[in-house]
C-alpha cells in the first residue's frame, strides 16, 4: 500500500508542479506585456508637399500642383516620378484629413490613352453626383477592390486624378483647389 500511496503522491505532485509552472509563466508574460512601453504615435510623418513640389518643378520643368490644404489636412507622401516604365511622368501626393479620410492627387504629363485607361481600369462613371462639373466621377465596378472614389480631369495631353475615401463634399473642395491651382 505504501508504494501505491507514494506513486499517487508523485503523480499528484507532477500535476501541481505543472500547474505552478503554467501560472508562473503566465504571470511573467503578463508582467512583460505590461512593462514594455508601446509607441502608439502615428508612424507616418507629414511631408512638406509644397517644398517637394518646388523641387519637382525645378527637376521637371512642369508646373506641378501643390494646393493649400483645408484646415486639419496634411500631406503624408509626395513624389515626382520621371522614370516610369510606361514613359509618363507624373506627380503624386497624398492628403490625410482630420477624420483619417484620404485623398490622393496624381498629375500626369503627356499621357496617352492607354495610360489613362489603365489608371481607371475597373471604375465606372457615376452620374449621381454633380459637385464639380469639369470632373468625371467614377466608382469601382463589380468585383474591383479599389479606393471608393476616383475623379479625373483631362487637360489636353495632361491628366489629373483625385482618388480616396473622403466625402463627396471634400472631393469637391479638393477639385476646386486643383482648378484654382491650374488657373494660376
Image (tube, helix red, strand yellow):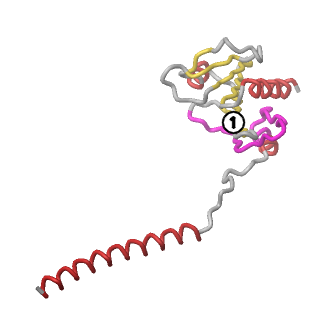
Furthest-right residue in this view: 184
Residue 164 placement: quadrant: top right
Q: Where residue 81 sits: x, y (%)? A: 66, 38
Q: Residue at x 54, y 19 (%)?
A: 141
Q: Residue at x 82, y 24 (%)?
A: 176
31 or 136, which is in the foreground? 31
Residue 40 higher or lower than 180, as above or below = below
Residue 12 higher or lower than 177, as above or below = below
Apparent side of residue 150 relative to residue 33 in the rendered image (left or right)? right
Q: Where residue 182 sits: x, y (%)? A: 83, 25
Magenta span has 98? no
Q: Which residues are magenta?
A: 56-85
Numbered marks: total: 1
Q: Where residue 70 sits: x, y (%)? A: 83, 35
Furthest-left residue in this view: 1
Q: Residue at x 77, y 17 (%)?
A: 132
Residue 100 placement: quadrant: top right
Query: Quarter of the image containing the C terminus?
Result: top right
Query: Quarter of the image containing the N terminus?
Result: bottom left
Residue 23 placement: quadrant: bottom left
Furthest-top residue in this view: 127
21 or 123, which is in the foreground? 21
In the rendered image, which residue does mark 1 sit on?
102
Residue 165 higher or lower than 19, as above or below = above
Amino acid at each position: 500500500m505504501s508504494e501505491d500511496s507514494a506513486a499517487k503522491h508523485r503523480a499528484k505532485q507532477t500535476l501541481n508542479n505543472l500547474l505552478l509552472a503554467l501560472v508562473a509563466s503566465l504571470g511573467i508574460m503578463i508582467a512583460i506585456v505590461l512593462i514594455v512601453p508601446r509607441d502608439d504615435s502615428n508612424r507616418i510623418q507629414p511631408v512638406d508637399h509644397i517644398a517637394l513640389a518646388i523641387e519637382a518643378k525645378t527637376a521637371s520643368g512642369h508646373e506641378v500642383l501643390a494646393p493649400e490644404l483645408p484646415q486639419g489636412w496634411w500631406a503624408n507622401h509626395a513624389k515626382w516620378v520621371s522614370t516610369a516604365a510606361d514613359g509618363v511622368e507624373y506627380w503624386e501626393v497624398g492628403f490625410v484629413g482630420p477624420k483619417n479620410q484620404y485623398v490622393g492627387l496624381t498629375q500626369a504629363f503627356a499621357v496617352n490613352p492607354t495610360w489613362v485607361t489603365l489608371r481607371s481600369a475597373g471604375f465606372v462613371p457615376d452620374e449621381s453626383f454633380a459637385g464639380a462639373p469639369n470632373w468625371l466621377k467614377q466608382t469601382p465596378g463589380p468585383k474591383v477592390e479599389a479606393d471608393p472614389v476616383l475623379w479625373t480631369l483631362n487637360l489636353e495631353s495632361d491628366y489629373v486624378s483625385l482618388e480616396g475615401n473622403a466625402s463627396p463634399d471634400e472631393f469637391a473642395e479638393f477639385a476646386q483647389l486643383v482648378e484654382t491651382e491650374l488657373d494660376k
